[in-house]
Image (cartoon, rainbow, N blue to C red):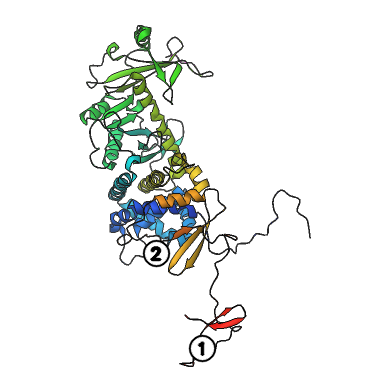
């Protein structure tokens, strides 16, 4: 016998574990999909692509792909993580079946994307209705509007793909444009729409911006398509005559980055004429006064006749942070930035802070890239459009889960703001053991996992599905009941079973029919099994 001297226990590892379910914590995603009606909406929307006598529902395949991305996958083959746990995810399609479905959807991409978008809109309306006061549109008005952030990102292609092209950053790939709904400081956000574009697409293409904003407005529940209670935030790429005029005609609020018109010398001369008492202190991210930063309105200093009526120009000047490279456009050592808005009420510092919070869109893009957007794995352009729709579905499902299930738990106040990597580490990766008792199927979450209590509380927070008309597609034989009961010993131990008749247990003749019946042994006495 050798004595272990290392810091970790010496273990003999094999692959003979049974009834062990990996990624069981992701069941909260399935419960959320059920509760918001996403399972039924996808099944109905994609019914035209289901072949006669097909074993797999296209809606469930798409939802399974979205769940696989939410728990860390980045390609179609990562669906094997779900296929390995039929106790939780039910019957999962094979890789060839998934590939054939993607090809079928891509063959009629506009119609397929519209069907998926319709299912997403239906589920979104249900999710916001269930969220109550935590819904993004709760109390939305002109003073506190719904915020849609529009921004583009670069996705690198490491091989030849259809429509991949050189990018302005000397890369190669795609330049998709996304629209996200901001949940504010208490939450994260959810994608509303996207436009997949080649890598050489322009940053300020008006047609693309209008298309993605229209698609985003169509995703909002009824009553939010127009009006000042919807604010569209765009960076400097949206500061064009055509886009601002279109937003004005749609009567939408906007806050858009802006390049001051004129030559540099003239701009600097005009800004130098602003009296010091007209510069108001700016706020930091926590709405506190920021030393060395000021804001002022300069609408009357520039010729704006060709721009939409009611547009206000607000500039911000601040001292560059230590180590920042100075620019030729700096005025007296101050960095100058500008934006335009049609909001008429509120302090300048509040309006400027609201515009700078557009940077949260960068967080949403980073989370989307952690959920499958970092790599477009398919060859055809239309196939990658379907992939982007699945990425949006995965991000939305995660956001709805956080809003409905991870809000209001004592000790876990920040759980609603967790990003995908933290959710996977703490929640989705919780293992479990599947068991049966009577007519119920149980899922014993690991009692030693540090966030099992949060997982159970999240499952309780999500309302149960309407089982009479929408059974869980991943669990057609009945709903799994997560629990940590019967966990006094090791959580991987198999549950006790009823004694079965074998050659070591005598089987006496039945008094009535002379047949042998199983018996049950209690201590040292053999008694007839009443069953």
Is 216 on the left-hand or right-hand side of 510? Answer: left
Comparing 393 with 476, the one in front is 476
- Residue 464, given in percent of the width and then of the height, sits at 36, 55
Choose between 183 and 120: the one closer to the eye: 183
In the foreground, 268 or 196 = 268
Inspect the magenta stretch and tell me whether residue 330 lies in it: yes
| Residue 376 occupies quadrant | top left
x 46%, y 52%: residue: 456
Quarter of the view holding residue 473: bottom left
Q: Main secondary structure of the magenta part?
A: loop
Please tell me whether residue 156 belongs to the stretch shown in magenta: no
The secondary element bearing badge 2 is classed as loop
Tell me where the magenta segment starts and ends, as one range. 326-331
Quarter holding the N terminus is bottom right
Of the two numbered discs 2 and 1 in the rendering, the one whose residue sits closer to the viewer: 1
Check disc 1 and report the residue beneath it.
516
The residue sitting at 78% across, 57% down in the picture is 2
> Which residue, as the protein is rendered here, is positioned at the far left?
249
Write down the residue under mark 2.
478
Residue 366 left/right relative to 231: right
Q: For the residue carrying disc 2, how many other residues have a C-alpha within 10 Å: few (<14), some (14-19), or many (20+)?
A: some
């Amino acid at each position: 016998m050798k004595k272990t001297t290392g810091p970790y226990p010496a273990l003999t590892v094999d692959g003979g574990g049974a009834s062990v379910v990996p990624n069981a914590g992701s069941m909260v995603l399935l419960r959320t999909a059920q509760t918001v009606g996403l399972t039924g909406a996808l099944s109905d929307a994609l019914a035209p692509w289901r072949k006669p006598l097909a074993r797999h529902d296209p809606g469930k395949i798409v939802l399974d792909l979205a769940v696989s991305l939410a728990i860390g996958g980045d390609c179609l083959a990562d669906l094997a993580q779900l296929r390995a746990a039929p106790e939780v995810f039910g019957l999962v399609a094979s890789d060839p079946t998934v590939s054939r479905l993607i090809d079928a959807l891509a063959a009629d991409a506009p119609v397929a994307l519209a069907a998926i978008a319709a299912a997403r809109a239906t589920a979104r309306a249900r999710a916001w209705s269930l969220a109550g006061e935590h819904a993004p549109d709760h109390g939305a008005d002109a003073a506190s509007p719904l915020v849609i952030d529009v921004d583009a990102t670069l996705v690198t292609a490491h091989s030849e793909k259809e429509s991949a092209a050189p990018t302005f950053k000397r890369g190669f790939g795609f330049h998709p444009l996304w629209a996200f709904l901001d949940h504010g400081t208490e939450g994260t956000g959810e994608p509303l729409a996207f436009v997949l574009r080649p890598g050489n697409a322009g940053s300020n293409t008006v047609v693309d911006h209008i298309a993605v904003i229209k698609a985003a407005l169509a995703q909002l529940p009824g009553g939010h398509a127009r009006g000042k209670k919807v604010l569209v935030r765009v960076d400097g790429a949206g500061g064009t005559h055509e886009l601002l005029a279109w937003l004005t005609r749609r009567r939408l609020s906007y806050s858009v980055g802006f390049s001051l018109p004129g030559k540099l010398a003239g701009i600097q001369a005009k800004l130098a004429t602003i009296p010091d008492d007209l510069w108001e202190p700016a706020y930091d991210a926590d709405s506190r006064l920021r030393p060395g930063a000021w804001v002022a309105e300069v609408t009357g200093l520039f010729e704006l006749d060709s721009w939409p009526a009611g547009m206000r120009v607000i500039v911000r000047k601040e001292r560059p942070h230590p180590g920042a490279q100075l620019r030729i456009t700096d005025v007296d050592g101050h960095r100058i930035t500008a934006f335009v808005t049609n909001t008429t009420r509120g302090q300048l510092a509040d309006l400027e802070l609201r515009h700078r919070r557009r940077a949260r869109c960068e967080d949403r893009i980073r989370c989307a890239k952690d959920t499958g957007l970092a790599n477009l794995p398919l060859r055809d352009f239309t196939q990658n459009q379907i992939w982007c729709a699945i990425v949006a579905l995965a991000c939305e499902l995660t956001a709805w889960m956080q809003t409905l299930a991870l809000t209001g738990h004592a000790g876990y106040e920040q759980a609603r703001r967790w990003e995908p990597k933290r959710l996977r580490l703490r929640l989705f990766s919780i293992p479990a053991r599947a068991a049966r008792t009577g007519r119920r199927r149980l899922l014993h979450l690991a009692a030693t996992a540090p966030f099992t209590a949060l997982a159970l509380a999240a499952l309780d927070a999500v309302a149960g599905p309407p089982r009479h008309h929408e059974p869980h597609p991943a669990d057609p034989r009945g709903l799994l009941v997560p629990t940590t009961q019967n966990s006094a010993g090791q959580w991987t131990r198999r549950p006790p079973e009823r004694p079965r008749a074998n050659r070591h247990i005598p089987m006496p003749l039945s008094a009535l029919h002379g047949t042998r019946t199983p018996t049950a042994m209690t201590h040292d006495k053999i008694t007839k099994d009443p069953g």
